[in-house]
Amino acid sequence: MRRFAFFALALVFVGLVLVPWHMQAAGVLSFGWVARASTRADAAPALLQAMWFGRWWFWPVCAAAMLGGAGALLIGRDRRLGGALLLAGGLAGLAATALQGGMIGPRGWFHAWPAELFGALKTRQFGIGLGGAAATLGFMAFATTGLAARGRFRGDAFVAFAVGLVAALIALFTVWPVGIVLAKVFTVEAGQNAFAASAGRIFEPKIWGLDCLSSGRSCGVAWNTLALAISTATAATGLGLCFALLVTRTSFPAKRLMRLLTVLPIVTPPFVIGLGLILIFGRSGIVNQAAFSLFGVELGRWIYGFNGVWLAQVFSFTPTAFLVLIGVVEGISPTLEEASSTLRANRARTFSKVSFPLMRPGIANAFLVVFVESIADFGNPIVLGGSFGVLSTDIYFAVVGAQADFSRAGALALLLLLFALGAFWLQRRVLGRASYVSMSGKGDAGLPQPLPDRVRRVVYAIALPWTALTVLVYTLALSGGFVKTWGRDWTPTLSHYGRAFGVEWGPSGVIWSGTAWHSFFTTVQLAAIGAPATAALGILTAWLLTRQRFAGRSALEFALLLSFAVPGTVIGVSYILAFNVPPLELTGTAVILVLCFTFRNLPVGVRAGMAAMSQIDGSLDEASSVLRASALRTMTRVVLPLLRPAIVTALIYSFVRAITTVSAVIFLTSAEHEMATVFIINRVINGDYGLAIAYASVLIVMMALAMGLIRLLVGERRIGRRASAPAAPAPIPQRA
Amino acid sequence: MSDAATLPPLAPLLDGGAFRARASEVRLEGVGKRYGAVTAVKPLDLVIEAGTLVTLLGPSGCGKTTLLRMIAGLEQPSEGRLMIGGRDATTLAPGERDVSLVFQSYALFPHMSVSENVRYGLQSSGLSKREALPKAEAALAQVGLSGFGERLPSELSGGQQQRVALARALVLEPSVLLFDEPLSNLDARLRRRMREEIRELQQRLGVTVIYVTHDQSEALAVSDRIVVMRNAEIAQAGTPEDLYRRPETVFAATFMGEANHLKGEIVGHEGEFATVKLADVMLRLPHRGLPLGPVDIVIRPESVRTGAPDGLRGTVRRVTYMGANVEYTVGTAAGDVFALGFDPDRPPRVGDDVALSFVGGGIMLVRP
């Protein structure tokens, strides 16, 4: 407790006295500010700014720091008083920091009324930097330590801080930006009626028009999105179920190969399938070419539009549905099926009356998962959509287009968010009400029943051709990088790879002359920074949610799940809106990309952590805390060593996903920080398929290797762990 | 091979001198716990005197484990105040309370060796590895596991794991030692031996022990005092003899050992005693403050005798031969009476007409 209070004090001290409060243009690590701190206010720490440069608005912040500091010094002697001081100092510091940051910007006062109240301001300030961030974190630690000292969070300062941290990060990097986008919908220009203006944006005919029913013109994007998502989800769920049954309930020989399919969507950037389809069915695709040369038939552009996007999405998301459904099918207790068969039911009856009803909630869940993936998908619609618009691409065009219409983007984002949250709500209901999954800690010693013959034939008839098609799409997508011009000049060549990844020897060493290197290095570097942050935050969150009981835990869990449901495009748009003005001015920096990766991939870390945590008996944590270990020590000595496989998994998955993501990142890249996927999409849009395919192939192979490595590492770890697992029976402590 | 055969004895190795005897009183003042609308423990007052072994006994779901976890600091009381050794511990973290808990599942860290497990608490309190090692060795010797330090918990039998858990708790020299159903994962023979060893250890070290169990014979065997819990509150607290011989309620009587529960009627008071009508016989029993009218009567099976001329008449319905004695059931006008006969040579036979009498304190009036 005392140590933690001092840690908080040190943070505040560093933030206020040692490092500059505001963001430095050259980066805080270049240390140019050290020399300028005495002459330029913007390079000075907050305390100096207040003392020397007349920036009086930092005095309340410093006063709050003193208050909290007094609490930190007192806490060893008088816990209640010290805690009260810490809490007061922390809250006051947060309030003072937020107030000055929210009111004073690069042009003095942000608003008119304080200028009238206090008079015009001669100075100004930019966005906060390292100092501001450290101090804010420190103030938060003051407040949470104060709460812990007063008996909240079972008196544990670390847990209190971790809860505060996670809550603050969700608020700052999901709730606030999304709120700003939504506020745009309701922004009124002079002379407009507020209600009519926002209603007009939300219900405009371009979004909700039904022209496609009566005439040849296209429908509104909202209808497009819904129709696409529902048809994709239906097809992908059906296919996923076939694969799940094939793998778990038949004697199909190549089961391991099928499981490999599940890795594909993780390592594949989302538009690669679209690319592959263009190479097959596009105007210069092999099918069209063959049809023309053999039968003289012109197949046309049917792949561009709803059909193509739908096909690409079904290819992309079937593995996701498979992954969800395989868990569902495996989760059905064989004992129930055995019971059914002993009760004179034949296989068909057992399947239709027992197995299938038990799978139903899981199937609904898979449907909703794919539905959400489909409405959030950006890569396939932008590559194959043509004039067929969906919400996510329209948001993009509203922002990057000449008009830069943020109110329209906001309205579209609001709809997209509502669809996603609606699906999320349904998902919670489906899973909450009827979770039949009959797995318990006890091993059910039974054998799953084989499928009824008719079902088995259907499964084979659907799954096998589809597998062949998937393999074909991938093969073509990958081989497209090795021919000169697809459809016209089939000469094998390595020139695309040369253009992308050329390396030359210059006088001063290696010259990375390929056009792809810049974005490649940036992407790998930023993903590598983001991955540890994702893993750490994800596992910390999982630990809090599974192992700690505190007031507001279910609220935190709900907020977290809700933030996961926000589609990437919405996040992208909201980040550029929220973080392009002080106090948090991050657009154009690498920081915003790393933050985006971290929060977009947080679910990966949380899920890996929660899954691993549920394997570890909770009494181990409790034993550690009874044995005088602080929560921090429990975390580092007991939880983390047992979680090592989960940490490796979270690290690699978040790294891979950061590299393959498109939707949010496309809004946030800049010339300096260009991301690989965005680079490739721009090549595709320009028709430079060869280079795009070459680059995408390199990414896929690299990511697949990374995933293979992790399977190898974690697989071995797990075997090692089982050997040393406790033989203690009854892993779940009985609550009497 | 069974655990009981391979484990070295614990008691002869016990040497209280290696550990400081330091016991604290635990005092609960209005301590209660609610989860939302569910009350796990109703606000209750309880004093556990320093140096005594107290069991919290009750059926599952009665709140006994929640109460123990609140004392350990693993749960925060919703109300009330908890004092350990005269210090307000209500908001203290578990590690700051000078208590140790032996878990039902032992909760040995699977990735640490036995020695690392035992040293864990010491090193958490700031001792270096060098300082902690000899203490851990001594603690392992205490529980008869010298030389097992380098093994992993998974390489030990259940009984050995239990002892490591005990050593890990003891090495911290806590002034209060908590046990959460420590014997429930052991086989019957080992359970009997371990409970005697725990009792001897407690008396030797003079430490305060709070012990949760749902097994009444375990509670009777080890306790100085027993706190019987039911429906989130204390049903009755007292010495084992108090609870067995003077239960206050039907629940306490039937939960502590076997008891017949019959209905009678108090027809008169006379000083300390009441005249009670049970079917067609009149009994003279201490009235224990109960008013005239219908009353609950409990009868211990071992106090039932046959052959009294003016006893409760009935017919033997069932006889079970148990080796050391004979169990039989007699149907009477007041209901079935279950009894133990101590003469296997002359067992009652089904169909015999008998008259029952009750000896000693084995029959009493209780509240419903």
Image (cartoon, helix red, strand yellow):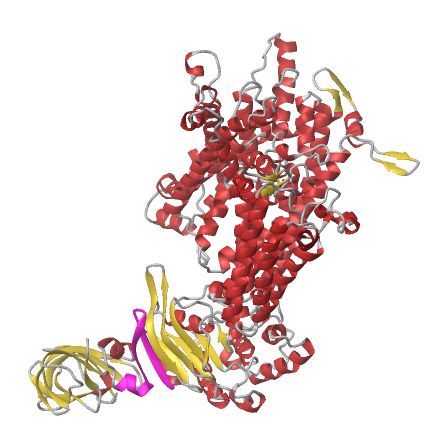
The x, y position of residue A342, in whole percent, is 35, 49
The x, y position of residue A50, in whole percent, is 66, 53
**Could you say which is closer to the camera, residue B277 or residue B75?**
B75
The question of residue B233 being in magenta is answered with yes
The question of residue B310 being in magenta is answered with no
What is the tally of numbered marks visible in this picture?
A: 0
Which residue occupies 32% across, 59% down? B37
Residue B298 figure quarter:
bottom left
Which residue occupies 46% across, 19% down? A219
Residue B354 figure quarter:
bottom left
**Could you say which is closer to the camera, residue A318 or residue A599?**
A599
Asked if residue A148 can be seen in this view, the reply is yes
**Could you say which is closer to the camera, residue A441 or residue A375?**
A375
Question: What range of the chain is rendered magenta?
Answer: B224-245
User: As displayed, is residue A661 above or below residue B139?
Assistant: above
In the orientation shown, which residue stands out farthest toward the right? Answer: A507
User: As displayed, is residue A254 above or below residue A445?
Assistant: above
Left or right placement of residue A707 versus residue A418 in this view: right
The x, y position of residue A550, in whole percent, is 46, 59
User: As displayed, is residue A484 above or below residue B244?
Assistant: above
* Position of the C terminus of chain B by quadrant: bottom left
**Could you say which is closer to the camera, residue A407 or residue B271?**
A407
Which residue occupies 69% across, 41% down? A590
The x, y position of residue B76, in whole percent, is 43, 67
Asked if residue A612 can be seen in this view, the reply is no
Left or right placement of residue B112 versus residue A622 in this view: right
